[in-house]
Image (tube, rainbow, N blue to C red):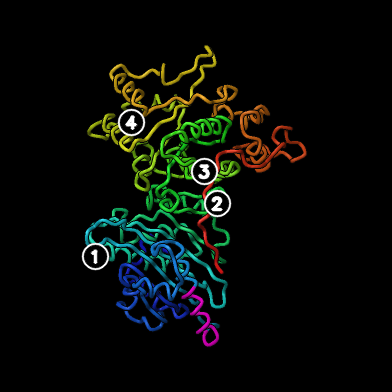
């Protein structure tokens, strides 16, 4: 494939002219914007078996079964199940040897008349890559950013054509497929914050890497997946939930990371109107952190994710280096409490005004954005190993011109000190642990959870020399079960399977 991909009309026509492709379109909520392209460019009779739109809720329920929400993943999967099954039932015997069947569906909430709704949608395709092949599937979640309904419909139609074209002609190159989803569009019009590949054509695809690609390519500013590697759609996980975030490099996950999170959970759960069972806890890694050495090392990325998974943690990959941008992103989905836990060293950096030169209001504007939704920062102390002194919020050194602002935020309770930490972990620094791993210094296992130590040695993560299980240090082999972190951090899988 050349550097310049076809325009939308050419893509739709290429699909129509491919004699193998035949299937149905089912679209709810923004008109039949995708199938319209295929009718418009000609030769549609060779591609479209059926086009329909069940707008009425009762009609939709009668066809696809009842559903609590109509713009959700479950409704999309019900649509794909129903339409693809009908295609196979009705057409496989007569033309299955020469036809690769597909079902495309979307369910969308485009801008309403008053402009008061969240403009987003689910879109997917279930298809056979070749005649008689097992099924494959791609599901995406889109956010429509245009301010006019007609423009949103137009953008939705283009994304749908891109998805169909990619599924049929780029399924062997998932990186290119993802990049092609915004062909003839821009990130000012459409955001794709979730993608999941499944089925025979994508048996070698790691959806965690695909989630990373969304952020890397700018199609989304954040992506999320669970401890078992399943892709999560952020709004469905975070909607109306209290959220606690720990940002880190997790290279590797250390006892300090776990201790910091547990101490923050204790503080966070004590807040008014917090139900501990509802709290969503996230381990966040920024793209800047992943790109610290230049290009992203996928093996290093997956190693970090795997050690977090060993402790049952849900991972958020974001392009929000500035904390106020992360806060705004989380506040998009919830009005409940938001907490961010960090070390005292990170708090010192937070008060460095060199990071806010792009804001007209500088550091004052950044803090106004950060704390406007009653967000709290939970600070883990920093140990000076020479003097034995702890840096806490009470003795933190900030620039003289910012001391009044700093004290105001502390007195108001926006910044709180963590006081239930384990002193035994204060001497652990992740960079030193990483260097010990790479130097084959066995002392590193004392600074990470047992499950993490075992995983690193078995898989050779972070430059560790692989060690046979029988030769593992005693502590690392004691227990490989997830750590006893609050269950609020465990998010149910939202990934579907192909029947």
The residue range painted magenta reads: 82-95
Closer to the eye: label 1 or 3: 3
Closer to the eye: label 3 or 2: 3
Mark 1 vs mark 3, CA separation in Å: 41 Å
* Mark closest to the chain's N terminus, 4 or 3: 4
Observer able to see residue 287:
yes
* Mark closest to the chain's N terminus, 2 or 1: 1
Identify the residue under disc 4.
355
* Mark closest to the chain's N terminus, 4 or 1: 1
Identify the residue under disc 3.
488
Mainly helix, strand or loop, the magenta region?
Answer: helix
Closer to the eye: label 4 or 1: 1
Find numbered disc 3 in the image and state the secondary structure of the residue it sits on. Answer: helix
Closer to the eye: label 2 or 4: 2
Q: Which mark is residue 150?
A: 1
Hey, which residue is sitting farthest bottom in the picture?
94
Q: Is residue 100 above or below residue 237?
A: below
Residue shown at 42% from the left, 44% from the top: 318
Residue shown at 54% from the left, 78% from the top: 131
Residue 84: percent from left, percent from top: 49, 75
Q: Indicate whether residue 466 is drawn in magenta.
A: no
Label 3 near label 1: C-beta < 8 Å?
A: no
Label 4 near label 2: C-beta < 8 Å?
A: no
Local crowd size for mark 4, using a 10 Å CA cut-off: few (<14), some (14–19), many (≥20): some
* Mark closest to the chain's N terminus, 1 or 3: 1
* Mark closest to the chain's N terminus, 2 or 4: 2
Mark 3 vs mark 2, CA separation in Å: 17 Å
Find numbered disc 4 in the image and state the secondary structure of the residue it sits on. Answer: helix
């Amino acid at each position: 494939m050349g550097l310049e991909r076809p325009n939308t009309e050419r893509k739709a026509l290429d699909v129509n002219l491919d004699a193998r492709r035949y299937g149905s379109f089912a679209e709810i909520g923004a008109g039949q914007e995708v199938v319209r392209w295929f009718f418009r460019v000609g030769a549609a009779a060779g591609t479209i078996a059926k086009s329909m739109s069940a707008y009425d809720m009762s009609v939709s329920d009668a066809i696809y079964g009842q559903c609590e929400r109509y713009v959700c993943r479950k409704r999309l999967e019900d649509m794909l199940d129903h339409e693809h099954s009908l295609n196979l039932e009705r057409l496989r015997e007569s033309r299955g040897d020469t036809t690769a069947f597909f079902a495309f569906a979307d369910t969308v909430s485009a801008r309403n008349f008053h402009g008061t709704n969240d403009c987003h949608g689910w879109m997917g395709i279930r298809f056979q890559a070749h005649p008689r092949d097992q099924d494959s599937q791609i599901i995406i979640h889109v956010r429509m950013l245009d301010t006019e309904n007609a423009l949103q419909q137009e953008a939705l139609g283009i994304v749908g054509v891109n998805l169909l074209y990619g599924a049929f002609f780029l399924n062997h190159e998932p990186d290119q497929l993802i990049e092609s989803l915004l062909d003839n569009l821009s990130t000012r019009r459409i955001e794709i914050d979730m993608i999941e590949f499944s089925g025979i054509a994508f048996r070698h695809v790691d959806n965690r890497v695909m989630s990373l690609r969304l952020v890397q390519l700018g199609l989304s500013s954040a992506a999320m997946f669970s401890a078992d590697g399943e892709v999560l759609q952020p709004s469905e996980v975070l909607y109306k939930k209290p959220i606690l975030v720990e940002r880190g490099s997790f290279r590797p996950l250390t006892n300090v990371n776990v201790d910091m999170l547990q101490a923050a959970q204790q503080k966070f759960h004590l807040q008014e109107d917090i139900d501990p069972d509802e709290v969503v806890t996230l381990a966040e890694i920024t793209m800047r952190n992943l790109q610290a050495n230049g290009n992203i090392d996928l093996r290093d990325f997956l190693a970090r994710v795997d050690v977090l998974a060993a402790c049952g943690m849900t991972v958020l990959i974001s392009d929000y280096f500035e904390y106020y941008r992360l806060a705004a992103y989380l506040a998009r989905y919830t009005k409940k409490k938001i907490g961010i836990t960090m070390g005292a060293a990170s708090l010192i950096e937070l008060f460095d005004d060199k990071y806010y030169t792009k804001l007209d209001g500088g550091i004052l504007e950044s803090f106004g954005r950060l704390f406007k939704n009653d967000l709290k920062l939970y600070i883990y102390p920093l140990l000076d190993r020479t003097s034995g002194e702890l840096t806490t919020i009470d003795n933190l050194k900030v620039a003289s011109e910012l001391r009044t602002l700093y004290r105001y935020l502390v007195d108001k309770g926006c910044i709180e000190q963590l006081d239930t930490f384990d002193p035994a972990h204060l001497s652990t620094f992740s960079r030193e642990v990483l260097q010990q791993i790479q130097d084959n210094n066995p002392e590193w296992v004392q600074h990470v959870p047992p499950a993490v130590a075992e995983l690193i040695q078995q898989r050779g993560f972070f430059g560790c020399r692989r060690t046979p299980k029988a030769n593992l240090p005693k502590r690392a082999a004691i227990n490989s079960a997830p750590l006893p972190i609050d269950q609020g951090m465990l998010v149910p899988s939202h990934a579907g399977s192909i029947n």
